[in-house]
Amino acid sequence: MGKTCHLTINADELFIKGLMAKTTILEANAPTQFIKRVQECFQYFDLLRMLSYRDIRVRYAQTYFGLAWAVLNPLISVVLLYFVFGIVAKVSTEGIPPLLYVMTGLLPWTYFARVVGEAGSSIISAQSLVKKIYFPRLIIPISKAVSGFVDLLVVLVMLAILLIIYQIPLKFQMLMFIPFLGMTVLAGIAFGIWIAALTIRFRDFSHIVPMLLRIGMFASPIAYSTVHVPLQYKWLFNLNPLTGIISGLRWSLFNTPLEEMSVIISLAVISLFLISGIWYFLRMDHYIADII
């Protein structure tokens, strides 16, 4: 009997040690906690892929046109902006064909608005999953950025078609299109995480975000140039991260004048919101299940 008891105790000790070896202990005040929590998201890549795929399916499920809406939405926006700014207001497009000019500006905005709009309510809509099991909650708003690639890809294809139709020549400078596209993705993730975290605490943001996006559409140089902005408001205008991104995209494709300070400010704003957004979200992570 003594030997059996001794073996049982050893087995329990081994079992506990095994659990401790596989368990990640989260310490709120640990200096490296920020990095560890971000790295944890990569361990749940399959969950991220599943959530993103689910978002795409749900978005177009039981609709008559299905994925065609991914084409119709930006197409209608381009036509409306072209009519208002190109025909009615006759805003200068810096020598670029108006449709091509508007499509280039609409490219980052379509993705940004989609990600921020969906990320705001992402945690609330996934509360049944959040309350049942543990996983990095940061994956939920990030999954909206991944599912938004569908809209980004559609507008990219439409832009490529217009570039071919208007016979825009290829040049080495066009490679800079990729970094500015990466800035667009980071901007969507940064602001999406912030909105998701704030909506958990303050439900008013579910009503504020659509209004801010409507304002942001006209506060971004989608269908007009930054040269039309009065100098006294230029600094405020440049705080919009999409200002530098859109300016950079047009510069890479059409060699339009590039305001380097605008790009630098956009990078700074995106970096600030990305780091602070993740930090604030991780602080809220401990209370998410209780609040929602």
Image (cartoon, rainbow, N blue to C red):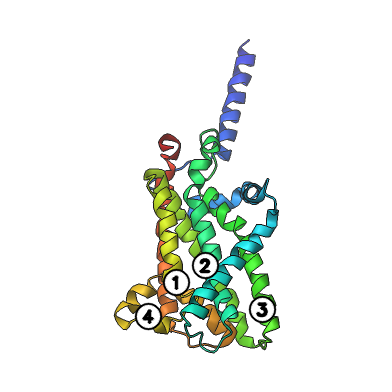
Q: Of helix, strand and loop, which one carries label 2?
A: helix
Verify CB contact (< 8 Å) between mark 3 and mark 2. Answer: no
Label whose residue precedes the other's in the sequence (3 or 2): 2
- The answer to whether residue 188 is left or right of residue 160 is left
The kind of residue on which mark 1 rests is Ser
Image quadrant in which you'd find residue 269:
bottom left
Tell me the amino acid under the disc marked 4: Val
Q: CA distance from mark 3 to mark 4?
A: 27 Å
Q: Is residue 32 visible?
A: no
- Which mark is first along the chain, 4 or 3? 3
Task: Give x and y (percent) for residue 284.
Answer: 40, 45
Residue position marked by numbered label 1 in the rendering: 220
Question: Which residue was labeled with disc 3?
Answer: 162
The CA span between labels 2 and 1 is: 8 Å
Q: Quadrant of the N terminus?
A: top right
Whole-Å distance between the Cαs marked 1 and 3?
A: 22 Å
In the drawing, does residue 173 fall left or right of residue 230?
A: right
* Residue 231 seen: yes
User: Contact, CB < 8 Å: mark 2 with mark 1?
Assistant: yes
- Distance from the alpha carbon under mark 4 to that under mark 1: 11 Å
189 horizontally vs 203: left or right: right
Q: Residue furthest top?
A: 1
Q: Mark 4 touching mark 2, by CB under 8 A?
A: no
Left or right of 133 on screen, residue 160: right
